[in-house]
Image (spheres, grey):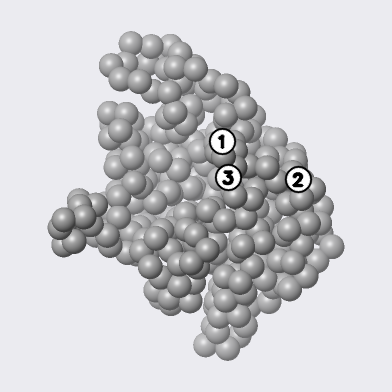
Amino acid sequence: MKLDDILKERIVILDGAMGTMIQKHNLQEEDYRGERFKDFHTSLKGNNDLLVLTQPQIIKDIHREYLAAGADLIETNTFNANIISMVDYDMVDLVDELNYEAVRLAKEACEEFSTPDKPRFVVGSLGPTNKTASISPQVNDPSYRDVDFDLLANVYYRQAKTMLEAGADILLVETIFDTLNAKAAFYGIQDAIEKTGINVPLMASGTITDKSGRTLSGQTTEAFLISLEHIDLISVGLNCALGATDLIPYLEVLAEKAPFYVSAYPNAGLPNAFGGYDETPEMMRDFIKPFLDKKLVNILGGCCGTTPDHIKLMADLAKEYEPRKINVECQA
């Protein structure tokens, strides 16, 4: 079954937070290093993407927990596996291997759980990098940029090409805080699709950074959507930064105006004073219920603070609802 056919029939479930699940293992420096990098010259603790090489069983087991909870879509552990973010760990030369192994682990987990009636899909996760093409990092020089469109496009081309060759079913550009970055990302992804001859569905997910209702680069939800409408997306949506309740007005905009399916995977509330998330699975289930009552979404999952328990209750609840229907006038 193709993803598009499934989306027409029911709400599709995306997995939850990878970082939250990794934190539960309380991994130390030696765990991140493993045997292969035991003598590496810089600290590696916190490089979660590296765990696909040094702790692959942990990553695969996290995928399996989300699949057992009912997830249809499993994101690869590659949020920072790009040649910009890996500079922080001096591991740029590992980017291709990280992405390939991350897809391989996710595919193995999905194959274990897939059935003809409920196929599971590997979603190649491409994060936003820690650079922005729209905003100067130097307050005294608003014209300065430390990254440009061409560099970003190449960063995403390299990551996407490896994911496609490894067998990713879908590519997701997520946590978009700067739409110019996203445009470069999809330009690079399209180049990778053309070079490899492998065409897969594309997803975009932006992030509203606070209750101003705008992305970090200043766009409203509708402006964000308009900026990406020229791309052949299967879905557009929102993730991270806010809890479910705070996302509702912005999802209403997408549900009304998007010519694509709509996705949402909010945090388990806002972070507390210690950086943790307090919404229990039961609380979050109740908070996402308006998404379903109002038929705002087609794809539903969780971001920071969410666990397989959160996803299971979402999946169980979603079975009772029909998905949002794409407005034909929007497509025209």
Q: Which residue is mark 1?
A: 274
What amino acid is found at the position of numbered circle 2 in the picture? Pro
**Mark 3 in CB contact with mark 2 (< 8 angstroms):** no
167 sits to left or right of 311: left
Q: How many marks?
A: 3
Where on the picture, by quarter, is residue 324? Answer: bottom right
Pinpoint residue 189: horizontal percent, then vertical percent.
37, 57
What residue is at 61 percent from the left and 33 percent from the top? 21
Residue 122 shows up from this direction: no
Mark 2, Cα crowd under 10 Å, few <14 / some 14-19 / many 20+, is some
Q: Which residue is mark 2?
A: 281
Among the two numbered marks 3 and 2 on one chain, the one whose residue lies closer to the N terminus: 3
What residue is at 33 percent from the left and 40 percent from the top? 85
What amino acid is found at the position of numbered circle 3 in the picture? Pro
Q: Nearer the viewer, residue 274 or 34?
A: 274
Q: Which residue is mark 3?
A: 271
The residue tagged with tag 2: helix, strand or loop? helix
Residue 102 shows up from this direction: yes
Question: From mark 3 to mark 1, how far is it between C-alphas?
Answer: 7 Å
Question: From mark 1 to mark 2, how far is it between C-alphas?
Answer: 19 Å
Mark 1, Cα crowd under 10 Å, few <14 / some 14-19 / many 20+, is few
Mark 3, Cα crowd under 10 Å, few <14 / some 14-19 / many 20+, is some
Q: Nearer the viewer, residue 70 or 245?
A: 245
83 sits to left or right of 35: left
